[in-house]
Image (cartoon, rainbow, N blue to C red):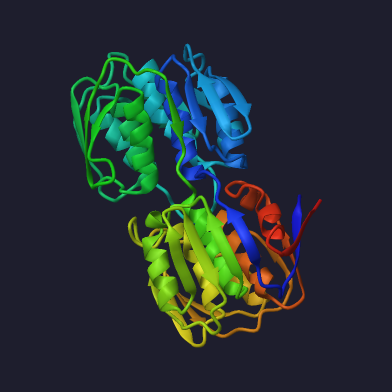
């Protein structure tokens, strides 16, 4: 397994470009199953989860051509409406093919998803929504089986709890369902709106994407389309905080600051010199000492849970005590013990972490436990004195495109070793 070896203590300086969104690319790839015509996606990041999804789609019946960050998919027929465990055990997003497969092929057999061990992400929201649309659901031997041989029917789907992938899955199923579907308590994330934009280009009739109520008028078939994936707000946010923790001078380009409002407010409250010169750029300047600022994760437009670990690493360098509360996942503090190995002082109290700064971080051997925890350890290592070795960086490869190369380009002393 690959490792990162990082020599800390150097402020980052330069320009970091933002890749396309992994969390937007995955449902967009799945949406290509809804039509026999070509779907062309630009700005698809070449990360592990994307490659896994592409292999899954090929097994299902898609032909895929990749040229740089452009992916062209064509699915003339659904050959095998199945997502096997062996292929999707490392990826939560496998459930995103449920809706498209049932909508187009009338059936699906999908392994219960894998991915990061950060807490339960119940797929029952997807299943209850599909049942509302007329699918018959069963579960055995670790697989979900869904069948709708007579097609799906529009219905009212109301989620008990906001779910991003659940909203995306039902949205993709509803576009080919007969009649009108209303999705209530829908996720408002930019990735949901991006999926709706793609589906609309394919001929779907969708209103309300980006709000808590989405209305879909089903159509009989969809066409091909060309679409550019939005910028990855989590990657951009990670680089902003990496610049801040090293007291660096960095320009993050090609991003969407309007998707990072909650994070920008918190960092500015903490004393980070963070400005937005235009609609696609964020600039971090050296800002001296940081103030401790409490933060609670929330669904969009609140502070993203995928940036919580990175924010906690940053708060270890604030002058005082801050509280970080995680409301989305119940097991997303696994990075705390590894940060502690590097000298951080953090105490866990249920879903709240009490961070005492300013910690003198020093290099150590640490293990990445999940995707975003990996990013927090990289940040801490960049700020630490001495050498840090981060093991199991395959986690970070799931969601960050060439992160070591992007950081090395702005002065980080980081190497990947086998």
Residue at image location 59% in from the left, 65% down from the top: 250
Residue 346 lies in quadrant: bottom right
Q: Nearer the viewer, residue 121 or 410?
A: 410
Horizontally, is 24 left or right of 201 in the view?
Answer: right
For the image shown, how many numbered marks are present on the structure? 0
For the view shown, which residue lies furthest in the right direction?
Answer: 418
Residue 145, how many percent across, how many down? 41, 26
Residue 168 lies in quadrant: top left
Residue at image location 58% in from the left, 22% down from the top: 64
For the view shown, which residue lies furthest in the bottom direction?
Answer: 320
Residue 253, how many percent across, how many down? 53, 54
Vertical position of residue 283 compared to residue 314: above or below: above
Residue 177, how many percent across, how many down? 26, 22
Residue at image location 49% in from the left, 45% down from the top: 21
Q: Nearer the viewer, residue 407 or 167?
A: 407
The answer to whether residue 137 is visible is: no
Vertical position of residue 408 compared to residue 135: above or below: below
For the view shown, which residue lies furthest in the front direction?
Answer: 277
Horizontally, is 402 left or right of 187 in the view?
Answer: right
Vertical position of residue 142 compared to residue 297: above or below: above
Residue 147 lies in quadrant: top left
Residue at image location 30% in from the left, 48% down from the top: 188
Horizontally, is 181 left or right of 403 in the view?
Answer: left
The answer to whether residue 238 is visible is: yes
Residue 110, how many percent across, how many down? 47, 29
């Amino acid at each position: 397994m690959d490792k990162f070896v990082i020599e800390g203590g150097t402020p980052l300086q330069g320009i970091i470009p933002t890749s396309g969104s992994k969390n937007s690319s995955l449902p967009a790839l799945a949406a290509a199953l809804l039509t026999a015509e070509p779907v062309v996606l630009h700005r698809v990041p070449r990360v592990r989860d994307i490659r896994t999804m592409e292999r899954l789609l090929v097994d299902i019946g898609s032909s895929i051509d990749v040229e740089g960050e452009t992916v062209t998919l064509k699915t003339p027929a659904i050959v095998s409406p199945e997502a096997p465990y062996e292929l999707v055990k490392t990826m939560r997003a496998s459930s995103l093919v449920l809706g498209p497969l049932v909508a187009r092929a009338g059936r699906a057999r999908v392994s219960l998803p894998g991915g990061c061990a950060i807490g339960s992400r119940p797929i029952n929201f997807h299943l209850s929504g599909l049942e509302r649309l007329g699918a018959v659901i069963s579960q055995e031997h670790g697989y979900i089986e869904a069948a709708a041989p007579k097609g799906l029917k529009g219905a009212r789907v109301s989620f008990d709890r906001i779910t991003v992938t659940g909203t995306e899955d039902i949205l993709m199923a509803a576009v080919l369902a007969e009649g009108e579907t209303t999705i209530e308590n829908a996720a408002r994330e930019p990735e949901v709106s991006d999926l709706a934009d793609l589906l609309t280009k394919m001929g779907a009739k969708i209103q309300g994407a980006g709000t808590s109520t989405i209305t879909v008028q089903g159509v009989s078939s969809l066409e091909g389309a060309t679409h550019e994936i939005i910028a990855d707000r989590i990657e951009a946010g990670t680089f902003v905080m990496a610049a801040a923790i090293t007291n660096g001078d960095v320009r993050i380009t090609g991003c969407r600051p309007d998707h990072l409002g909650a994070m920008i407010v918190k960092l500015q409250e903490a004393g980070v010199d963070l400005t937005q010169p235009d609609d696609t750029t964020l600039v971090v300047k050296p800002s001296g000492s940081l103030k401790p600022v409490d933060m609670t994760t929330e669904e969009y437009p609140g502070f993203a849970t995928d940036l919580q670990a990175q924010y906690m690493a940053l708060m270890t360098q604030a002058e005082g005590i801050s509280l970080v509360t995680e409301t989305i996942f119940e097991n997303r503090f696994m990075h705390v013990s590894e940060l502690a190995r590097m000298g951080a002082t953090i105490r866990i109290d249920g879903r709240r972490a009490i961070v005492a700064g300013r910690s003198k971080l020093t290099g150590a051997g640490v293990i990445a436990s999940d995707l975003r925890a990996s990013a927090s350890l990289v940040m801490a290592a960049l700020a630490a004195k001495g050498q840090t070795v981060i093991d199991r960086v395959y986690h970070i490869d799931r969601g960050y495109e060439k992160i070591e190369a992007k950081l090395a380009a702005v002065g980080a002393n980081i190497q990947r070793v086998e």
